[in-house]
Amino acid sequence: MTVTTEQLEANKKLARDYIDQVFNQHNPARAADFVTGDVVWHGGGLGDIAGPDNLAGLLESFIGALPDLYAAEQDIIAENDLVVIRLVITATVRGSLLGAPADGKPVRWNAVDIYRVTNGKISEEWAADDVAAIMAQIGTFNPPWAA
């Protein structure tokens, strides 16, 4: 697969715009503007979500619990049809999250998201969030190394 420098830059812009407009501007309904009709979100232990409506629903519940969420880009790499972004995410828990009630506490974690871009839209995403760090901060997991 041969991809031009211009296409790689366009793919990076798409991924950055998606993070900015959906997450940082707290507008999960906008996800449908950035994804294909057959998009699949791979969330590791959280499972897979298929379709733009289901993706928007997942993001709505997540962003709803963390209404001040901010994803700060640390690195971005594009090759062929993939864009990889390493992020540091900060937020305040204002709604139920991963089985814990809202407590108003701040949370911070690392994430790596990989996006497959097809015809100018995101067709797949692999989300690798440090769920153990989130759960430890909200009190639903006590990692042995934190004792």
Image (spheres, helix red, strand yellow):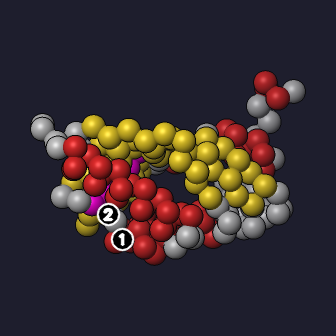
* Mark 1 neighbour density, 10 Å: few (under 14) some (14–19) many (20 or more): many
Horizontal side of 7 relative to 73 (left or right) equals left
**Quadrant (top left, top right, bottom left, bottom right) of the N terminus:** top left
Q: Which residue is mark 1?
A: 32
Residue at 64% x, 61% y is 69
Q: Which residue is mark 2?
A: 35
Is residue 83 placed above or below 28 in the rendered structure? above
Q: Is residue 43 magenta?
A: no
- The residues colored magenta run 121-126
Horizontal side of 133 relative to 104 (left or right) equals left
Is residue 80 placed above or below 35 in the rendered structure? above
Question: Would you say the magenta stretch is mainly helix, strand or loop?
Answer: strand
**Quadrant (top left, top right, bottom left, bottom right) of the C terminus:** top right
Residue 146 at x, y = what percent?
A: 82, 29
Residue type, mark 2 in image = Val
Asked if the residue under mark 2 is in contact with the one under mark 1, i.e. CB atoms within 8 Å, the reply is: yes
Residue at 18% x, 58% y is 119
Camera sees residue 57: no
Horizontal side of 119 relative to 116 (left or right) equals left
Instruction: Give SS at disc 1.
Output: helix
Instruction: Give SS at disc 2.
Output: strand
